[in-house]
């Protein structure tokens, strides 16, 4: 996931800042007119969109998943809110209630952020490793991509980037959701994303 400082750096990039402001305005108008949330924290909410989508893939949010999302929200929030209501976690409740209406809009902002922070075409030209062990192959592939892309990837589907290089068992609907997110973000054809998908065991 992203750190508070990384979110703060991205929100200063004009293209990301503008897209975030527009999305926040529409979200407040449609979902929560009284919501008080900074530009920084709204971008944090947007960056949680893939994780929220994956969490909802099975139809509901478990207590464990809710705790994981709240942990992600608090890590990216500006200033930290350990002793009071976290604005990102609070806004997330509204987003989860009407997620279908906002998923594509928020993913578009993430696409803008990706375009503003790394060269997608360069990643398409990279040749992925073809080791027999898919986890080792993915670990090698990660070493060839920009640090910021690893951050995007870990925020997309994981609550803790420390687990990004590992075998994971997921359901078919969760795997399909990851593929769907990759397609909407325009990264499904990247060798490193294909390598990432091969680390999953579908249960």
Image: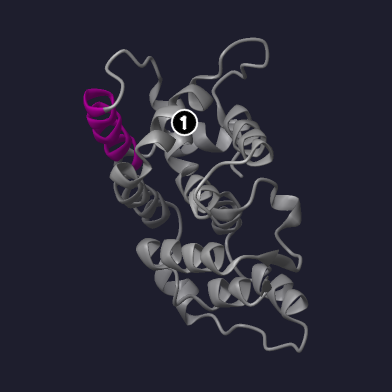
> How many marks are shown on the rendered structure?
1
Asked if the stretch drawn in magenta spans residue 116, the answer is no
Residue beneath label 1, please? Answer: 92
**Residue 3, percent across and down?**
61, 36
Q: Quadrant of residue 38?
A: top left
- Give the left or right position of residue 138, taking residue 109 as reference: right
Q: Quadrant of the C terminus?
A: bottom right
Q: Nearer the viewer, residue 110 or 96?
A: 96
Chief SS of the magenta region: helix
Give the x, y percent position of residue 191: 54, 79
Tell me residue 24's x, y (percent): 30, 29
Q: Is disc 1 placed on a helix, strand or loop?
A: helix
Residue at the location (44% across, 77% down)? 189
Q: Is 129 left, or right, of 11 in this rendering? A: right
The residue lying at 50 percent from left, 42 percent from top is 48
Vertical placement of 85 versus 31: above or below? Answer: above
Residue for point 46% across, 59% down: 118
Camera-nearest residue between 56 and 115: 56
Quadrant containing the N terminus is top right
Q: Point out residue 114 in the picture as x, y percentages from the top left corner.
A: 42, 55
Q: Residue at x 40, y 28 (%)?
A: 94
Label 1 CA crowd tier, 10 Å (few <14, some 14–19, many 20+): many
State the extent of the magenta-drawn residues as a range: 16-30
| 80 on left or right of 176 | right
């Amino acid at each position: 996931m992203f750190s508070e400082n990384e979110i703060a750096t991205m929100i200063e990039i004009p293209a990301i800042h503008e897209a975030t402001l527009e999305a926040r305005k529409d979200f407040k108008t449609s979902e929560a007119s009284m919501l008080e949330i900074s530009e920084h924290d709204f971008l944090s909410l947007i960056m949680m969109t893939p994780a929220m989508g994956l969490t909802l893939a099975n139809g509901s949010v478990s207590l464990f998943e809710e705790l994981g999302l709240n942990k992600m929200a608090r890590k990216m929030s500006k200033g930290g809110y350990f002793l009071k209501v976290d604005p990102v976690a609070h806004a997330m409740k509204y987003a989860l209630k009407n997620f279908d209406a906002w998923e594509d809009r928020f993913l578009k902002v993430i696409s803008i952020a990706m375009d503003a922070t790394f060269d997608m075409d360069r990643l398409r030209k990279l040749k992925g490793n073809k080791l027999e062990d898919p986890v080792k192959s993915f670990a090698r592939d990660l070493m060839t991509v920009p640090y910021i892309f690893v951050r995007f990837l870990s925020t997309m589907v994981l609550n803790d980037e420390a687990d990004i290089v590992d075998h994971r068992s997921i359901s078919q609907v969760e795997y399909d959701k990851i593929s769907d997110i990759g397609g909407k973000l325009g990264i499904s054809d990247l060798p490193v994303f294909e390598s990432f998908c091969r680390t999953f065991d579908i249960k």
